[in-house]
Image: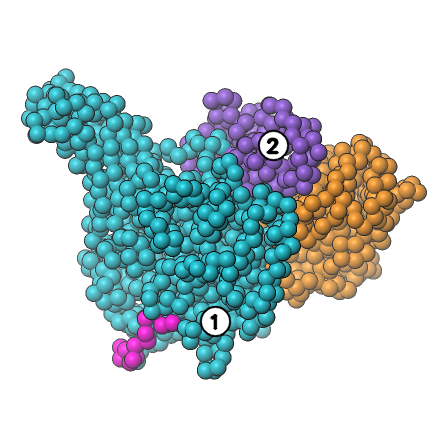
Amino acid sequence: MQINITVNGQATSRDVEPRTLLVHHLREELGLTGTHVGCDTSNCGACTVHLDGEAVKSCTVLAVQADGHEVTTIEGLADGDTWHPVQQGFHECHGLQCGYCTPGMVMAAAALLEEIPDPSEAEIRTNLEGNLCRCTGYQMIVDSVRWAAEHGAKA
Amino acid sequence: MSLVGAAVKRKEDPNLLVGRGRFVDDMSPPGTLFAQFVRSTEAHALITAIDTGGAEAMPGVHAVITAADVAGFPATANLPEEVGILRRRVLADGRVRFVGEPVAVVVAESRYLAADAAEQVVVDYEPLPVLASIEASLAAMADPDGPRIHPDLGTNALPAIPEPEEVAPQYTAAHHKGSLRIVNNRCAAVPIEPFTCLADWGPDGLTLWGSVQAPHFLRGHLCEFFGIGTHECRVIAPDVGGGFGNKIILYPELYLAPLLSRKLRRPVKFTLTRSEAMVMMGHGRAQVNEVEFGFDDDGRVLALRLHTMQDEGAYPDTTGMGLGVLTSWMAGGCYAIPVIQAWVTNVITNTTPVAAYRGAGRPEGAFMIERVMDWVADELGLDPAEVRRRNFVQPDQFPYNTAAAPDMVFYDSGNYPAALDKLLDTMGYDELLAEQARRNSTTDEPLMGIGLSTWIEIASFGPPGSLEGFGHLGSWESAQLRVQPDGSMLVSSGAAPHGQGTGTSLAQIAADELGADFDTIDVRFGDTATVQQGIGTMGSRIMAVGGDAVRKASMAVKGRAVEIAAHLLEASAADIEVADGSFSVKGTPARSVTWREVAFASYRPLDIPEGMAPGSLEETVYNSVPNFSFPSGAYGCVVGIDRDTGAVEVERYVCIDDCGTVINPLLAEGQVQGGVAQGIAQALFEHITFDEAGQPRNSTLMDYLVPAASDLPPFKDMDRIVTPTENNSLGAKGIGESGAVGAPPAVANAVVDALSGFGVRHLDMPFTPEKVWTTMQAGRA
Amino acid sequence: MIPPQFDYIRAASAQEAIAALTEHGDEAKLLAGGHSLIPLLKLRLASPSVLIDVGRVADLSYIRDDGDEVAIGALTRHRDVEHSEVLAAGVPILAAAAHHVGDPQVRNRGTIGGSLAHGDGASDLPAVVLALGGTLVAQGPGGRREIAAQDFFRGFLETALAPDELLVEVRVPKTSGGWSFQKFNRRAQDWAIVGCAVAEVSGAVGVGLVNMASVPVRATAVEEALASGATADDAAALAAEGTEPPADIHGSSEYRAHLARVLVGRALAERG
């Protein structure tokens, strides 16, 4: 069926099989490969995007469910060449190593800061419990989000 | 200002942070077909029939192949001749030996169609007896007609190091003796990117993109398998989403993708799902260590006897067969144990093959010896820190030849007492002991345990001959430095990083040595077409061997650049100094030329000294190191145990690391934290198990518990001591696997410490709440 | 990873959904937030030929203060239940329990109606609704009917909903006294190994258990003991009575029974 999704501010219109997962639609149909697939049981969160501004696991959303809605992926987080504070924080504090979990982690963290602009370390850890990272052990991710909170995450 | 030793931010980050990374599954050249495995549902069975008709008839399906279609191909290599019979065919040939073993492949227009078609392939099995554990496999050996997983091999057990004929008299004579049977729990590496490969075989040859850690190694084996020349084969490892040793392995799909691409004349891509990856990618650990030890009244260990049984899974490869050997080499730990007898049995089982996983044999060794030290302390009523002190190799004893591997393994440098001192000081050990006494005498506060791990590991693989034994071309690492006319520089390294930040750290080394601009040094790896021969990223070797290579290449280029600068400045080369992008005459800084000017001049015959050819500012180095290096450290762990549920929480974790010279402390610390996280996860959360029928019990991330941020403690107490190595000009020992080696014993020792009041002398990982609670109940009874 | 093929119907109203359910019967499954169904589809543990998407049905997402009780539309997302001021004031246990469902991304999509209609004994919210003695409102071709929570969960993943019925609302009484929700798991994002919900409604204490049977169950022995004046400790000791705790990779039946006793004890102590 024909679905229309605004992705990173751009209107898109495609014909999809209803069973198409949003993550595959973004990656393969729309060519936005920044969002990654890391599991098949909705645990890892590498596929996290914003759906109408809320963090969701795009592997557990059908593309048809996003019809008529707005999706922001990692490619759409920065403002042109100006990084989102979370992206900058991950760079400052070495919050990424292999980078595979990073898009999902950054999107989850950005959504967290919209809700809780000045989160404690415990709140950061709790609110990132849907995102797995195998490289960092999480401390530098937590530091990155704290950096973003201190350096101008959007209120 | 020196960049080596500075916390320089990574060059790798920008692409990855904005979603412009290039992982293999991101690429689908025009015409790409998608391959999907049909995998065995039986752990050990004969394949009596495969019906592919239903799948072949489905729209969009281009091929369905089974072992019959690839009968002419050799088995995959990477095994010594004497066990060549174990070589694995790319598709199960008449017999499956583990659940998940690929039996057939479906190739279709889309991954969705391929998934549908794979379901239509019907495989008939005739079950065979399943040997799903070391115990079952060895028990079957008692019967000469008992099941053999590889009948032509005739055995399920391969002695990698034979048992010594006699028991060391020093053990027999020891006043005190102890023994432990330790099960080091099977884990899965779980890189967040599972595994993907994409092959495009056209008339001009084969290009394969793979999420791999050793592209040149893979290329060599592909050429051997297909009987083609290196000139016709290109392997590219682009961005790789984690490896942990798991992506060195020569998986069947790495051969099948090219095979299918050649057959179908289209690019073919395999993207494993997580469930597939959990059963098809190599597992780690899965070792049983039976150790007995003799010690004196002061807690000095006089003799150690260790039998390591390594579960190989169904298809051993050279790495899998070497794990127990590495464990045996490191059986002495940081300690001057005068007599060590260590022997290794590799046991084949009907389970996923076991291979390298972060530490690859050394975490198991460290775990064993650190438990031994605590056991000795417990037995004699001594403080575990004190027992360690009494056994340490002392700073004046290096290079130290461990009795575990006489004349073979020489620890290069270290200061184990200093690391332990720093750990205890940072932890506030005495205060913790007081707190523990207080808490454990209450009835409601969580039980408190304190655990130490003064660990050592063998890294910087390795001296000549070491990696060749694992099927690699050499043990060196390569670097090529090329200065461009505009002064920017290309460094090509044989490394194949997957998160280590090698592109940053190697640039730091080059920039420092050359006095050049870090920002205009580009480091490249992963593509066999553009990178000279290389070995790859594994065994914590890249800074030590690869970084040293970059430094040597830089030094050679610098020498010639200085000559050009001297020529341009009409000065003597001996009077030229290089810093901050400029060559100047000592004492007269106004007389200078920039790197850009020197670089440009190097291509202009009229501007270079007599006798020098244009294009001289390039150098290729194949760098060998004379020995392994031995990172070490002291980790401390405090746990709290819920008295009613058995839940274990890590309340505090402290790390003191010694990796020799630190190139980039930010990256080094990141490596330690990541390794420690995996080590704590092994101790508390992770365990791949199979039932008696060889069915995996946890092959998804729902049931295999990789922890998230809220499940792990903060890592804020990170410090180091520095004892450089003489094995390379940087003094760097390697750090990538340290955390995974050192962390589990600290947690284990803390848990056993907490439970000692229940009479617990030892407990195997993982320390699940139920296991801990059951143990406490038994102790209460 | 890849769901099987299905036909897709988007219902604009409850009536349309019911009509589609009536037409397709067993072949159809409802899709709300998708966080119970889509995971099953991806593992191919479910293969409905028709999916009826009720995610856009208007007016089924609300949290309404109805005096003695709070009415919650079936399509209300877990995150809205978690952050609801109406619930924080009137039925705080439900808001607290919703916080424990999955992780933030799951809570942004999953719905309370989807969770209850799925009827998994290992889910958090059914135990809470049982403890509260809530009411589930189903709508079918013949109109609406009310089903008491204790009659709603019938068997393994089986509820009292008829094949042609849609869950449209859940109503929960406001709690009159202390409450506590306890969830024991190894990783924060996981299902409970065991959990319990304790809530006092009109002076009586209800106790719901998570993952102590193949259906959501109440700890009736505990409730009866408390009603007849037993101490909290004595009542908690009965937590596993009448239950059939599952045995799996995360816990044996014996350990789960023990955890139930511990958690109920803690819940009774915490509620004050």
Q: Which mark is residue A50?
A: 2
> Do we see residue B428 in this rendering?
no
- Classify mark 2: helix, strand or loop: strand
Q: Is residue C158 above or below residue B290?
A: above
Task: Kindly report the distance in space between the C-alpha atoms of the residues bearing marks 1 and 2.
Answer: 50 Å
Chain A rendering hue: purple
At a point 36% along the width and 45% down the height, the residue shown is B233
Residue B297 position within the rendered picture, expressed as x and y whole percent measured from the top left: 31, 73
Asked if residue B591 lies left or right of residue B639, the reply is left
Amino acid at circle 1 = Ile
Q: Chain B colour?
A: cyan
Residue B29 x %, y %: 49, 37
Q: Is residue B534 placed above or below B285 in the rendered structure?
A: above
- What stretch of residues is rendered in magenta? B157-170
SS type, badge 1: loop
Residue sitting at 55 percent across and 69 percent down?
A: B46
Q: Residues within 10 Å of mark 2 (few under 14, many from 20)?
A: many
Queried whether the magenta region covers residue C159, the answer comes back as no
Pick the front one: B771 or B234: B234
Q: Quadrant of residue B594?
A: top left
Residue C252 place in picture, x, y as percent: 64, 65
In this rendering, the label closer to the viewer, 1 or 2: 1
Q: Residue furthest top?
A: B590
* Chain C visual colour: orange
Q: Is B665 positioned to the left or the right of B674 in the image?
A: left
Residue at the image position 21 percent from the left and 22 percent from the top = B600
Residue denoted by label 1: B149
The quadrant in which residue C248 appears is bottom right
Question: Does any portion of residue A86 appear in the rendered image?
Answer: yes
Where is the N terminus of chain B found, in terms of image quarters?
top left
